[in-house]
Image: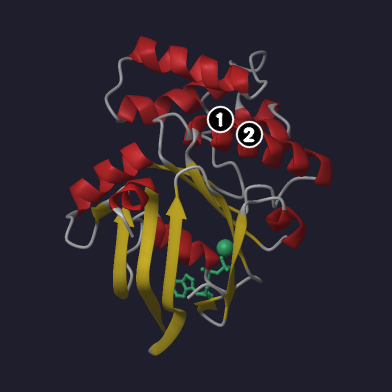
Amino acid sequence: MNENEIRKEILFLKNITHIYNQDHQKIKVLDNINVRVVRGEMVALIGPSGTGKSTLLNIAGLLESPTFGSVSLAGQNCKNLNEDLKTSLRGSEVGFIFQSHRLFPEFSAIENVMIPQLIMGEPKLKAEKKSKELLSVLGLQKRLNFRPAKLSGGEAQRVAIARSLANSPNLVLADEPTGNLDPISAKNVFEILYKLVKSLNISCLIATHNYDLAKLMDRSIVLKNGSTNNN
Ligand code: ADP
Ligand code: MG
């Protein structure tokens, strides 16, 4: 790889093996996986339930350390980072979207998008302005003060997308983000996420077991028996 390609590389999971210990049994969930994601790419991580998609996303987002192998995020090798440094790298580089929106129920849409920015030390007014802009791009300018319970599933998931982008991450990790939605809302949420990833020129890795959705992305990585099709 030349220097240009290294600079474009947002995520590199190298020789990742992950073993869970459960009931005195060792379960190898990921077996020597290599994944590279470059800037501007939307990549599907596809495979049936239980194949380790969520585990891989958690490792990519530094929520979990792999048993073996290394993670590079935005050019930084994370192997020897302590928890504080991992938290700060995660906060600035990664946005997460989950299957259920996981918004704070007692806060409004705009507050939910402000919270990650406030945690990163942004001033309140700046966080508010950015949240308004993001929610407007997502077509939610009339829902700013609604709490999650007053939003439809698709709207709540769009707020979750706005929240994932709140700290201008380079990488969005989405774990079955449309899995709980009806087909029309799912398509709508996917399309809006796709457009945003492309217009912001960031990267996105999306776990899904939906092959039709995967076909709409730039490329797919298929997880099967702990391995991928691209090792
Ligand atoms: P997927 O997201 O593709 O459904 P997961 O990554 O959630 O797959 O899980 C992969 C496998 O690892 C499953 O067999 C699951 O039971 C197991 N697993 C996941 N998390 C844990 C854990 N914290 N402890 C033990 N086993 C786990
Ligand atoms: Mg999962």
Labelled disc at residue 195: 2
Q: Report the side of 110 relative to 74 (left or right).
A: right
Circle 1: element type: helix
The image quarter in which residue 199 lies: top right
Query: What residue is drawn where x is 30% and y is 15%?
Result: 123
Q: Amino acid at mark 2?
A: Lys
- State the image quarter where residue 208 is shown: bottom right
Give the amino acid at mark 1: Ser
- Between 105 and 143, the residue placed more toward the observer is 143
Mark 2 and ligand 2: say if the CB distance to the nearest ligand atom is below 8 Å: no
* Residue 101 badge: none
Q: Is residue 72 above or below residue 66?
A: above
Of residue 230 and residue 67, the one placed in the foreground of this image is 230
Residue in the image at 63% along x and 70% along y: 47
Q: Where does the image place residue 38, in percent across and percent down from the top left?
A: 44, 50
The residue identified by callout 1 is: 199
Quarter of the rendering occupied by the N terminus: bottom left
Query: At 69% from the left edge and 28% from the top edge, which residue is drawn?
Result: 151
Q: Mark 2 packing: few (<14 Cα in 10 Å), some, or many (20+)? A: few
Residue 112, image x, y percentages: 49, 27
